[in-house]
Image (spheres, grey):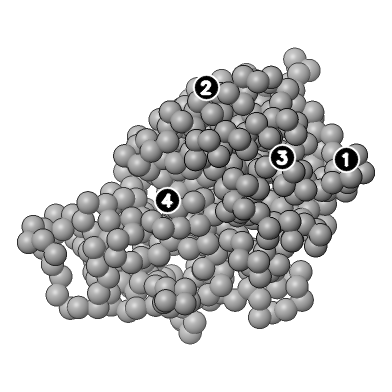
């Protein structure tokens, strides 16, 4: 340990920790020392070392920053515009016509609002899959968050869509002082041809890039794929080589039992992101098979999807809903436990976005992405089981402080890197042009 002052010391908190079996536990009255964006130590020593900045976190719990493993952050601009609709109408009648109006400025403003929402909810990293992603990368760099970004493309855009996705991924990989990682981002097997998927897989292997895409989103997609092609969407990923790259699959509620050995046999690292609120809202008949994927050793990260379908970017809610939906669908109240849910929200989510070696646990050598949660409110007292209190009683609004790479982005609920009022005002002015559907166009057709 160097004699110079640490950058940040957090004292008096209860820290969520993982043991050598990755079981979640808690250490009380702990001190976290941060230097150069990295956690230097987590101790229960009563001594507080000298630091440039001290945070007194008595009565608070320190958690690894939450990761939103699949979202479309700029879609917060469409929050609430397509309500109570089946999936096909949601896409074809509202969302994809509106998205044909998107400008880079709309995307930038949406990203600013989304990042503010996520920072206030204890999300320190998000995996984004959208358009005009240069602007999202700029917002991430400015506001201090961490992000895993991919420029989405459809085959209907021609080869330039795939080329733009690659160019973005190569140009922004490692940007924002290493806080930005990138992926190739084909939209889905039902909007991207087998040839384009195969080309993307080859590019991923050539350049050492992961792939982030939607697949087997719901059971209808899987059944339609079987009828039309004699293969499930997971089969398509296998035969096109996508499963030979590292791949993050969004949703997967249509994954069948027959898909499990295919996923297990993948030569790349496979992860799945689950966003249960949207599945409930769309009345999809199945949810992500978290337990079956867990049994295969496939990490399932927590996500929100975009706020146009989910209405929020609250990963805290995704954590609670994942636990509840899993209990309901498996008929087993012992699965998922609160501690398992916290594991999904921390280490598994970090692994899902390819950052399992640097994020996901508060331990020496890990990046200092930390949130402090206040449990003194009446809705979180008394505390008999701290894990259950965090998952089922606490809310995202109980997050007091959000830190990324040792930098405080929110202190005592005050955002320090974003001006929400300014963003909301300009977004409001732009809304009529964005919402106009009189042109009769859409960026793509949903036909599954």
- Callout 1–callout 3 Cβ contact below 8 Å: no
- Callout 2–callout 1 Cβ contact below 8 Å: no
User: Which residue is more in the foreground, 372 or 367?
Assistant: 367
Q: From mark 4 to mark 3, how far is it between C-alphas?
A: 33 Å
- Callout 1–callout 4 Cβ contact below 8 Å: no
Q: Position of residue 32 (x, y in %)?
A: 26, 66
Provide the secondary structure element on which disc 1 rests. Answer: helix
**Label 3, on which residue?**
240
Question: For the point 58% across and 23% down, which residue is it?
Answer: 163
Provide the secondary structure element on which disc 3 rests. Answer: loop
Relative horizontal placement of residue 391, taking residue 274 as reference (left or right): left
Crowding at dot 3, Cα within 10 Å, few <14 / some 14-19 / many 20+, comes out as: many
Relative horizontal placement of residue 204, taking residue 236 as reference (left or right): left
Question: For the point 41% across and 40% down, which residue is it?
Answer: 180
Q: Earlier in the sequence, mark 4 or mark 3?
A: 4
The number of callouts visible is 4
Q: From mark 2 to mark 1, how far is it between C-alphas?
A: 36 Å
Q: Position of residue 75 (x, y in %)?
A: 59, 36
Q: Position of residue 165 (x, y in %)?
A: 56, 28
Q: From mark 1 to mark 4, how far is it between C-alphas?
A: 40 Å
Provide the secondary structure element on which disc 2 rests. Answer: helix
Of the residues tagged 3 and 2, which is closer to the observer? 3
Of the residues tagged 4 and 3, which is closer to the observer? 3
Q: Earlier in the sequence, mark 4 or mark 2?
A: 2
Relative horizontal placement of residue 356, taking residue 186 as reference (left or right): left
Question: Residue pushed farthest left?
Answer: 3
Q: Earlier in the sequence, mark 1 or mark 4?
A: 4
- Callout 3–callout 2 Cβ contact below 8 Å: no
Relative horizontal placement of residue 446, taking residue 138 as reference (left or right): right
**Label 2, on which residue?**
104
**Label 4, on which residue?**
124
Question: For the point 65% across and 20% down, which residue is it?
Answer: 159
């Amino acid at each position: 340990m160097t004699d110079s002052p640490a950058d940040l010391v957090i004292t008096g908190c209860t820290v969520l920790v993982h043991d050598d079996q990755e079981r979640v536990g808690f250490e009380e009255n702990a001190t976290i020392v941060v230097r150069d964006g990295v956690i230097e130590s987590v101790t229960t020593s009563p001594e507080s070392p000298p630091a440039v900045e001290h945070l007194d976190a008595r009565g608070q719990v320190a958690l690894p920053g939450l990761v939103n493993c699949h979202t479309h952050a700029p879609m917060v601009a469409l929050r609430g515009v397509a309500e109570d609709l089946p999936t096909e109408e949601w896409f074809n009648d509202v969302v994809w016509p509106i998205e044909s109006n998107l400008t880079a400025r709309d995307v930038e403003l949406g990203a600013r609002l989304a990042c503010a929402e996520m920072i206030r909810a204890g999300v320190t990293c998000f995996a984004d899959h959208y358009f005009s992603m240069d602007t999202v990368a700029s917002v991430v760099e400015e506001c201090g968050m961490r992000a895993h970004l991919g420029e989405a493309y459809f085959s209907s855009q021609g080869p330039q869509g795939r080329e733009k996705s690659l160019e973005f991924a190569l140009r922004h990989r490692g940007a924002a002082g290493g806080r930005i990682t990138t992926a190739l981002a084909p939209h889905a097997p039902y909007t991207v041809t087998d040839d384009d998927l195969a080309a993307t897989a080859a590019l991923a292997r050539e350049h050492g890039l992961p792939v982030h895409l939607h697949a087997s989103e719901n059971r209808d997609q899987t059944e339609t794929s079987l009828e039309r092609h004699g293969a499930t969407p997971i089969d398509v990923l296998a035969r096109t080589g996508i499963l030979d790259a590292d791949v993050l699959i969004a949703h997967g509620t249509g994954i069948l039992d027959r898909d499990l050995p295919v996923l297990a046999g993948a030569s790349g690292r496979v992860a799945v992101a689950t966003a249960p609120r949207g599945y409930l809202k769309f009345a999809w008949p199945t949810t992500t098979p978290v337990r079956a994927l867990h049994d295969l050793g496939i990490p399932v990260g927590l996500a929100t999807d975009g706020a146009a379908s989910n209405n929020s970017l609250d990963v805290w809610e995704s954590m609670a809903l994942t636990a509840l939906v899993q209990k309901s669908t498996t008929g087993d109240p012992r699965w998922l436990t609160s501690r398992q849910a916290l594991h999904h929200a921390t280490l598994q989510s970090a692994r899902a976005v390819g950052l399992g070696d640097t994020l996901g646990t508060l331990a020496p050598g890990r990046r200092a992405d930390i949130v402090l949660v206040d449990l003194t409110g009446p809705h979180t007292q008394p505390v008999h089981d701290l894990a259950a209190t965090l998952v089922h009683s606490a809310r995202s609004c109980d997050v007091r402080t959000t830190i990324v790479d040792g930098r405080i982005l929110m202190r005592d609920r005050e955002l320090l890197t974003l001006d929400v009022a300014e963003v909301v005002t300009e977004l409001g002015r732009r809304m009529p042009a964005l919402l106009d559907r009189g042109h009769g166009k859409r960026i793509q057709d949903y036909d599954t």
